[in-house]
Amino acid sequence: MKRRDFLRVAAGATTAAALPFSYRPARAEASDCPRYLFIVEGNGYEPVSLLADSARAALDETMDSPVGSSRWWYRRYRHDSPISLDTPDLATAPALAALSAEGLVDQATVLLGLSSRIVGGGHSGRHGALASARTVGGQPGGPTIDAHLASLETVRQETPFEAFRVGVGGGRPIDFGTCAYGQGDAAPLILQSGAAYEFAYGAFAEGDAALAFDRRERLLQFASEDLAASERIFSGSLEERAKLGSYGRSITALLDTQEKLTSMRSSVTAPPPPEAGLSSLPRFASLVDLAVSTLIDGLTNVAVVGSGSGGPFSLRYPSVSATGRHDMQHQSGSNPALLQAIRDINSAQVAAIAAGARRLADAGMLDRTVIVWVGDNGEQHHSTASEFPVLLLGGSGVGLRSGGRTVIYPGVASDNNRQLSNLWNTLGYLTGESLDAFGGEEGDLRKAFGPLDEML
């Protein structure tokens, strides 16, 4: 990673800690702190991927005609109250077999029917899915939920990083299209596995990662000394002096992060670095595993893993198909082999997520960690953003109701429809904070305020 890219990522590791928020509940003990892992699929995924056999049967009873071979059906919902079902057969859903293999069905909940039309749909909602706000001209319309949660003292605690954000993307080293600290202020995802590992575990590793950590320390010390010298002789305007002060605070925060990482050397053992040159699916799995490690080791309490999110959605999966994901989506309506390839990709992604959840469970942390798998554009490749299927894992110890369930909310045409902003509000309630107005929805765009009662 180039020095300029590193500084943009490093600055992002501390910026959100300074974001304003309206309510600070009493400080929780670190062991009681809720943790969050957001998995964002940039190609979206279809509601049918999460539809268990028993949920399908219940849904068929409410619609004018059975789901049948449909992959999405947001126009066909007819119920006006949430349908909450015990679905111990979640593993019968096309993408969820791994839940049974990892013994996690009773830790999982599927949400169907949630909309987020403010996102706009299309190929990608970019920051919008996690922000419930429109991205315009590449600029986020507001903070994403990961950044907001990471800014809370009850979540941040004393961790070195406010959040750990990584992803699988195109040839770029960093993605600025998925997460945001606030309106017009994008947050970076590191797209280079080696750089992500060095960033998180350089303080505890050997070889190149350790050298990278030491170089970072020297670079920040030099920047701090250089800035102090500049301030001593500075004769410009008050506005320009204020900018110097802002740079100084950022550098000080980064040095504080370095110090915290150094102080943890006796208690953290670096995991093996991700293997270089991996294709998209194994790379995704390695990054989910790395993000889970940062949560288990106390480096952060908020992590994000993107997969083709933020714009570079046309990933290739050579172990599944020679056709790229973009063409795969377009041709799958008439090509059963490509439709099956999409199912296989989603299943492999859930397998990686479930393996991470199993690690958290074995570490005694899944009940206090909420894992969210969501697409960034909605119910189909050229989405209308009318439905965002969601898979949730864990969180029972922080007040999230799970237990092998499917909750189907009324469709977007109903006045009782609920939105992704209501889900993000629900996650805020787990920290003791009301996020009733989270997101940019106004007027007819906002269906309802408040959390999802069925999830608490």
Image (spheres, rainbow, N blue to C red):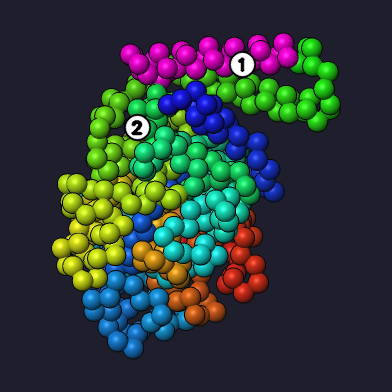
Q: Is residue 8 visible?
A: yes
* Residue depicted at x 61% and y 65%: 441
Please report the bounds of the magenta region as a residue range. Answer: 201-230
Taking the image as shown, residue 384 lies to the left or right of residue 415, namely left
Taking the image as shown, residue 105 lies to the left or right of residue 124, namely left
Q: Earlier in the sequence, mark 1 or mark 2?
A: 2
* Residue 338 spot, x, y in % from top left: 20, 62
Viewer-proximal residue, 284 or 154?
A: 284
* Residue depicted at x 30% and y 42%: 284
The alpha-carbon separation of the residues under discs 1 and 2 comes to: 26 Å
| Circle on res. 193 | 2
The number of numbered discs placed on residues in the rendered structure image is: 2
Is disc 1 placed on a helix, strand or loop? helix
Q: Which quarter of the rendered picture does the N terminus lie within?
A: top left
- The amino acid on which the numbered mark 2 sits, given as a three-letter code, is Ser
Viewer-proximal residue, 119 or 255?
A: 119
Does residue 363 sit above or below 392 in this rendering?
A: above
Viewer-proximal residue, 353 or 298?
A: 353
| Circle on res. 281 | none
**Magenta stretch, overall SS:** helix
**In the rendered image, which residue does mark 1 sit on?**
223
* Residue 382 spot, x, y in % from top left: 39, 66
* Residue 419 spot, x, y in % from top left: 51, 66
Q: Residues within 10 Å of mark 1 (few under 14, many from 20)?
A: some
